[in-house]
């Protein structure tokens, strides 16, 4: 394997590792949002807690599933 191939393979490996990490983070964020939703007093409480935890984005869409 010559250096350009090694460099390309390293870039592919990095991209794959990053995608796996992002997928794992999304799973953790959905689980956290689900737990917050389960323990919240009401929708206002839920929104406030999710905002405090930085979970108010797209990752929380599956929280009620």
Image (tube, grey):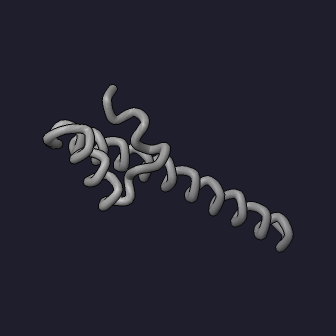
Between 57 and 20, the one lying in front of the other is 57
- Quarter containing the C terminus: top left
Count of all numbered marks drawn on residues in the image? 0
Q: Residue furthest front?
A: 44
Position above or below: 22 against 4: above
Residue drawn at point x = 31 percent, y = 52 percent: 50
Between 12 and 27, the one lying in front of the other is 27
- Quarter containing the N terminus: bottom right
Is residue 54 shown left or right of residue 18? left
Residue 28 drawn at (x, y percent): 35, 48
Q: Name which quarter of the figure residue 53 lies in.
A: bottom left
Position above or below: 8 against 30: below
Residue 44 drawn at (x, y percent): 26, 44
Residue 51 drawn at (x, y percent): 35, 56
Q: Name which quarter of the figure residue 12 lies in.
A: bottom right
Is residue 31 shown left or right of residue 22? left
Position above or below: 49 against 38: below
Between 30 and 58, the one lying in front of the other is 58
Residue 41 drawn at (x, y percent): 14, 41
Residue drawn at point x = 57 percent, y = 58 percent: 18
Residue drawn at point x = 18 percent, y = 37 percent: 38
Q: Residue furthest top?
A: 65
Residue drawn at point x = 57 percent, y = 52 percent: 19
């Amino acid at each position: 394997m010559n250096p350009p191939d090694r460099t390309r393979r390293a870039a592919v490996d990095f991209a794959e590792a990053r995608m796996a990490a992002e997928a794992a983070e999304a799973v953790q964020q959905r689980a956290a949002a689900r737990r917050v939703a389960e323990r919240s007093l009401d929708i206002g409480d839920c929104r406030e807690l999710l905002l405090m935890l930085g979970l108010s984005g797209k990752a929380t869409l599956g929280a009620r599933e």
